[in-house]
Image (spheres, rainbow, N blue to C red):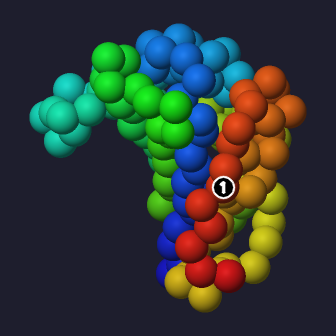
Amino acid sequence: MSTKLHLSAMMMVAASEGFEQFVHRIANSIPGIAFTVEDSGRYEEIPAYEARAGEMEFLLLGIPDEDIGHDDEYRLEFSCTTQASIAELLQRPECIFAGQFIRDKPLNSRGFLDYSQELADFLTSRGIEGCKPIIVGD
């Protein structure tokens, strides 16, 4: 029986533009990912978009454009729960892009593989400025 791996990442990005424009730039920065409006009602107070690629999920949480202030930030979350190894996961056609920020690494103190810093670095290299990783655990 194989063990499940729990991959995660979370970051904040300065809200220096409207949320729709930000979603478009993030979608263009992550190859093979298509964001759609998250309309389940779970985030009815704020705009939200989601994208899925196999077992990988991305969630973008925004602020209504009319409420954006000088210090506001958008939130990007990534999660994946899989029984595959990292090498197996990254060989799946729908997940190959993730090799740009996912690597084999030890579990953190919470039992997760946290890729917050790696995803922030990747997006920064793709021109997304102001990425601040939120790392939980060590």
Q: Image height check: is 30 above or below 24?
A: below
> Farthest residue in the front direction?
70
Q: Does residue 34 appear left or right of residue 103 in this picture?
A: left
User: What residue sits 39% from the left and 31% below the top?
Assistant: 62
Q: Position of residue 134 (x, y in %)?
A: 60, 61
Looking at this view, is 28 or 16 the one in front? 16
Looking at this view, is 11 or 27 the one in front? 11
Q: Which residue is mark 1?
A: 133
Q: Which corner quadrant of the image does residue 46 belong to? A: top left
Q: Report the label total.
A: 1
Q: Does residue 89 appear left or right of residue 17 in this picture?
A: right
Looking at this view, is 118 or 33 the one in front? 118
Neighbour tally class for label 1: few under 14, some 14-19, many 20 plus, Cα within 10 Å:
many
> Farthest residue in the bottom direction?
109
Q: Image height check: is 50 above or below 105?
A: above
Q: Amino acid at mark 1?
A: Pro
